[in-house]
Image (cartoon, rainbow, N blue to C red):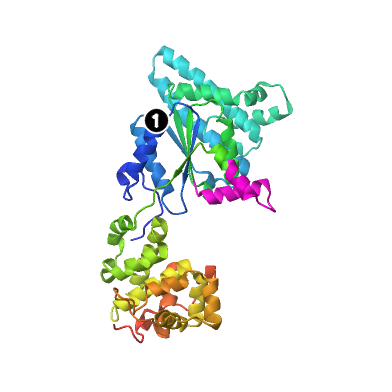
Amino acid sequence: MLLTDNPIPDADGDRFGFRAHADVLCEAIAATEDLPLTVGVFGPWGMGKSSFMKVCQDLLAKRGLPTVWFNPWKYDQKDEIWHALIQSVLTEIAQKLEERRLAGDLALRERMAGALDTVRRLSQAAAWLLARRAAGPLTAGILTADDVNSAQDALTEPGTETYLHVNRFEQDFADVVGTYTDGGRLVLFVDDLDRCTPDAAITVLDSLKLFLGEASCVFVLAMDYQVVAEAAARRFNAEHPDEARGRQYLEKLIHFPYHLPGVSFEAIVRHLQGKITDSQLSGSRELWELIEVAFEANPRRVRRFVNGLNLTAVTLRLNPDDPPSRRLLLHAGTLLALRMKHPGFFAALRADPGVWRRYDDAEFYKSDLSGQDAALSQENPGVRRLLAAVAHRREGFDFPDPPTPTEIRLLTQVLTVTGGPPNGGAAPAPAFTPAGATGEGQGQ
């Protein structure tokens, strides 16, 4: 069983307690009178920002509020991102207006036809601004190829109708949103800004200025605050980024900062405990202690760890005559966590398997590390804490003593297959042979 990183699709799929918080935010979005409004949903990578916004989108839809979802990281060029954002909104509006036009009476059909004509002009203005033949595929049927060509030709004809619509874009867009929402509000969710390149992320934020003048819109932007603030700082001065100026840029753009509520580790355990396929590990206190120390309450990182552990356990069972012991499986989990969190230490451990035991002894005797061991600890902050958490002499837990060199060689070979090369691209280990699963110290 492999777990995906996909966000939950709706409020009914919430497993981490987001709904109660999302209800509060959605109530505020629905009740706010002074529009447009920009909400920043802030949280580190992997903490569930996309899932939280999917819950919000579902709750708003149940209130009858129209929404649009946009993922800027799918577009790698700055002007493509800018254009795709605009065309995504216009396409969604055009589709719904056309549905209402076809289903309405004569007066409604005329009203919708007028709004659709404005949408078409807005789309053409956006294509004119882009002035690239790549615009065609992004217009999703609002414009034909001839329309785009005409818009590009208009670049050399100041004063034409297309050029005038560039200047009227903000007001025309506000009018279309008003028709589309019947005087209500449109909520635009922009996800994964922190997955974009710095220039692309800032391009998305800058492009919102086209909408922020008059339209009755709420923009909900998911981002790692620090990542995007640093991108803004580099935008103003690439050689000497001014972090304060980057933060000021976001503060001016974001009207309401919403810091994503943390997911409890207990909620992660409830959700994922049944996803661990090996019976020796599924209810292990020691395994979940390792996971909490290594990954805290980051749902995405824990899911990735569980995927790797499940594949590793299955691989170790390829030899039915020598099934892996609990000891070996717990060591596999620790090595997987080391590979994910501290790839440099993982690579060093492959070269010198005795380093784990020396760290374990230093923790028990409260002594200092020396030489290469001390340097390795400095290069991999946090690794000593992780190994201390799984120490076999730690009270209250039943962790096995450090693995033998034979066990480490076996497990690092398996993890190279089930989790990718250590240290971000080191040469792969020799091919894993299931019959080699017999090794010293495995029978505990």
Relative to 367, is 140 above or below? above
Quadrant of the image containing the N terminus: bottom left
Q: Nearer the viewer, residue 133 or 128?
A: 128
For label 1, count other residues whose C-alpha is less than 10 Å away and answer few (under 14), some (14-19) or many (20+): some
Residue 302 included in the magenta stretch of the image: no
Single out the residue that lies furthest toward the front. Answer: 366
Q: Residue at x 41, y 62 (%)?
A: 295
In the shown orientation, is residue 283 left or right of residue 144? left
Residue at (40, 74) in percent of width and height: 388
Residue, far top: 107
Which residue does the numbered mark 1 point to in the structure image? 30
| Residue pictured at 55% horizontal, 51% vertical | 227
- Give percent across and percent down for residue 71: 50, 43
Q: Is residue 225 magenta?
A: yes
Is 64 situated left or right of 240 in this image?
left
Residue numbers of the magenta segment: 223-249
**Closer to the camera, 95 or 347?**
347
Q: Is residue 388 visible?
A: yes
Where's residue 64, x and y in %?
36, 29
Task: Write down the quadrant of residue 4 in the picture.
Answer: bottom left
Majority SS type along the magenta span: helix
Q: Is residue 75 above or below residue 366?
A: above
Across and down, in percent, residue 436 comes to: 38, 83
In this orientation, which residue lies closer to the viewer: 231 or 131? 231
Does 332 sit left or right of 80 as displayed?
A: left
Residue nearest the viewer, comparing 359 with 365: 365
Which image quarter holds the C terminus? bottom left
- Quarter where residue 82 is shown: top right
Element under disc 1:
helix
